[in-house]
Image (spheres, coloured by chain):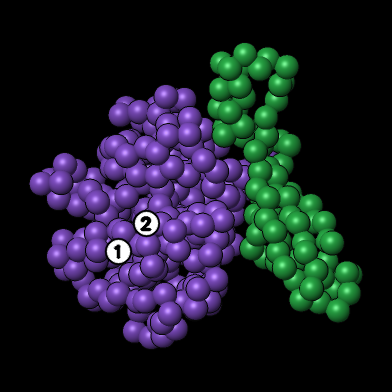
């Protein structure tokens, strides 16, 4: 059984959600990893959780990116280790250069905290191999800076290499401007790197694991991950 | 000791929602002569270096590594 590591920065606030999701819903081994830790031995899968690491001073994720543990996360990812960054975790992975692009303030400047729909765009990744292309997930978002930006060339390369894993859609799976609540380029909600072992996504699947919390649409994503890890 | 002033601005091609909202507020105040607002960051640094050139090099490295995100931002440095 795979062991998950959840990184804890000062200011992380979804670390316990991720821990609960993996430990109590998915029945996996989970370890918290403090931002000053540098030992990732025994960890098979890393989650960089949501929150406001280091107060998100300067830019979201900009300071967390230089924390001791992130140097190990970068090495782990470069060796092909699977890493999933959710919300602030996505922002940190962008700042670390593990995935391309940058985050800007939501185009209407509001912090958006609600359930949204996102569509699976490809099953070609360890994160989405158990999903269906076009499948729609109703899961929460909670961010002020989730307006994904990348240069035209960068966007084309993401599209050409099938690196967009999730896009904001309506409940029927149509990619509309209304569904793109934060103004992200090309409705992008989640992307992977060219090595396909790093995922960054703004929506919070770890907060949609049990019906008592309103949705269990996040669970198939973690089922997919566990299945991929057991096959690997 | 040198004083460095750094201006970090969004690249011209990038929409600036904060600038737009502020421009809108200025129009509401009747200050219609303002045609455009772009908001950036101003950062002041005290730099210990042997020369102005060395100070500039240190600040450039600080900007490229941390102070600006060159995916979406440009920076300008002034050393005094």
**Residue at the spot 71% in from the left edge and 21% down from the top edge:** B34
Image spot of residue B17 (x, y percent): 57, 32
Q: Which secondary structure lies at badge 2?
A: loop
Vertical position of residue B79 compared to residue B42: above or below: below
| Residue of label 1 | A15
Asked if B63 appears above or below A207 in the picture, the reply is: below
Find residue A168 and report its horizontal and vertical position in percent: 41, 36
**Quadrant assignment, res B27:** top right
Element under disc 1: helix
x and y percent of residue A162 in the render? 53, 48
Q: Which chain is green?
A: B
Q: Earlier in the sequence, mark 2 or mark 1?
A: 1
Please state the chain letter of the residue tagged with numbered disc 2 in the rendered image.
A
**How much space separates mark 2 and mark 1, taking CA atoms?**
8 Å
- The chain ID associated with circle 1 is A
User: From what the image shows, is residue A186 above or below residue A59?
Assistant: above
Observer-nearest residue: A93 or A79? A93
Residue A53 lies in quadrant = bottom left
Please report the residue visible at 35 percent of the width from the left and 28 percent of the height from the top. Answer: A170
**Which chain is drawn using purple?**
A
Evaluate if marks 2 and 1 touch, with contact meaning CB atoms under 8 Å apart: yes
Q: What's the mark number on residue A180? A: none
| Residue at horizontal 68 percent and vertical 15 percent from the top | B32
Could you tell me which quadrant the C terminus of chain A lies in? bottom left
**Residue on which the image places disc 2:** A51
Determine crowd level at label 2: few under 14, some 14-19, many 20+ residues with C-alpha closer than 10 A: many
Q: Is residue A185 toward the left or the right of residue A86 in the image?
A: right
């Amino acid at each position: 059984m795979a062991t998950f590591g959840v990184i804890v920065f000062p200011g992380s606030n979804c670390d316990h959600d991720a821990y609960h999701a993996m430990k109590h819903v998915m029945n996996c081994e989970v370890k918290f990893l403090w931002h000053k830790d540098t030992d990732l031995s025994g960890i098979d899968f890393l989650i960089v959780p949501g929150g406001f690491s280091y107060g998100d001073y300067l830019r979201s994720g900009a300071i967390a990116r230089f924390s001791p543990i992130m140097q190990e996360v970068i090495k782990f990812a470069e060796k092909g280790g699977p890493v999933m960054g959710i919300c602030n975790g996505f922002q940190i992975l962008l700042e670390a250069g593990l995935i391309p692009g940058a985050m800007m303030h939501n185009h209407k400047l509001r912090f958006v905290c609600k359930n949204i729909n996102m569509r699976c765009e490809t099953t070609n990744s360890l994160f989405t191999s158990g999903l269906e292309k076009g499948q729609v997930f109703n899961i929460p978002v909670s961010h002020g800076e989730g307006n994904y930006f990348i240069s035209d060339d960068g966007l084309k390369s993401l599209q050409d290499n099938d690196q967009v894993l999730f896009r904001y859609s309506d409940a029927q799976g149509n990619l509309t401007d209304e569904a793109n609540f934060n103004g992200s380029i090309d409705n992008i909600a989640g992307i992977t790197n060219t090595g396909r072992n790093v995922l960054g996504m703004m929506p919070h699947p770890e907060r949609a694991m049990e019906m008592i919390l309103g949705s269990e649409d996040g669970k198939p994503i973690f089922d997919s991950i566990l299945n991929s890890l057991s096959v690997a | 000791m040198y004083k460095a002033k750094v201006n970090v601005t969004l690249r011209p091609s990038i929409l600036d929602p904060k600038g737009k909202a502020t421009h809108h507020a200025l129009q509401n105040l009747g200050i219609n002569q303002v045609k455009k607002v772009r908001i950036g960051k101003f950062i002041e640094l005290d730099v210990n270096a042997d020369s102005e050139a060395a100070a500039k090099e240190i600040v450039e490295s600080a900007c490229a590594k941390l102070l600006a995100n060159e995916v979406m931002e440009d920076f300008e440095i002034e050393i005094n």
